Amino acid sequence: MKRIFLAVAYDGTNYCGWQEQKNGETIEGVLNRELSAFFQEELQVIGASRTDSGVHALGNVAVFDTNTRMPGEKISYALNSRLPEDIRIQRSLEVAADFHPRKRACTKYYEYRILNREFELPGERLNTYFYRRSLDGKRMRAACPYFLGEHDFKSFCSIHTQAETTVRTIYHLDVKQIGDLFRIQVSGNGFLYNMVRIIAGTLIRIGGGLMEPEEIPAILEALDRQAAGPTAPAKGLTLLGMEYEEISTLLFR
């Protein structure tokens, strides 16, 4: 028995998130089905990040245990030949038997994309949130330093969060602008349910002049979901990748 590591990229548009469920197609469900069929054994992946419905990834992580003799680095080629075109394995390799993607310390990287213009661009519709009201990138960037470091992010997570603690550490947060495309990039030691989307929604309100950057400390201290901005739509969010001590799936930044 050996443990195989997968770096998984996907367009989440047509999926009900990562985690397998009875009432809809999921990324985890597709991987379990195709791996089991290919290796002729009942296989189940363990995923690192359970992304929501409509969220995308360039480098999510999954592992599974198998009796196959196939070299780990060859599995990506075999599996990609069976997967739908909106899911692709970017890398596969054998790892230590005790490697658990959710229990190992890592840095997660996310990006939220916003198209800020008068009319939508069809080519951007699947992975970018269209927002017509004019945004001020300087105001958005002015708010970013307030998020850095260790904080209780209870104001920035869904009320349905089941985490044991809402304390997280953000290492980096920035807003990059190229023309009418805004890219909110954030990294940290972990993120709560809807946390990145709520941060994005709050920065959008700040960029639109509906909130002030200086309000962020008070919002953090409030520990109240109602104090922060709205949850930005799922389609603008992409999990860029994850960095463990021994391996990284971060392809683009």
Image (cartoon, grey):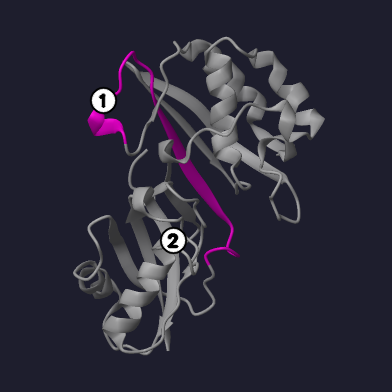
Q: Residues within 10 Å of mark 1 (few under 14, many from 20)?
A: few
Q: Say which residue appears at 54% left-offset and 77% top-offset.
A: 98
Q: Nearer the viewer, residue 195 or 246?
A: 195
Q: Which residue is mark 1?
A: 121
The residues tagged by marks 1 and 2 sit, at their Cα atoms, a distance apart of 31 Å
Identify residue type, mark 2. Val
Q: Say which residue appears at 30% left-offset and 17% top-offset.
A: 119
Q: Say which residue appears at 27% left-offset and 74% top-offset.
A: 75
Q: Please provide percent x and percent y for residue 204.
A: 53, 21
The mark total stands at 2
Q: Which mark is residue 55?
A: none
**Element assignment for label 2:** strand
Q: Which residue is mark 2?
A: 61
Identify residue type, mark 1. Leu
Quadrant, the N terminus: bottom left
Q: Please provide percent x and percent y for residue 27.
A: 40, 62
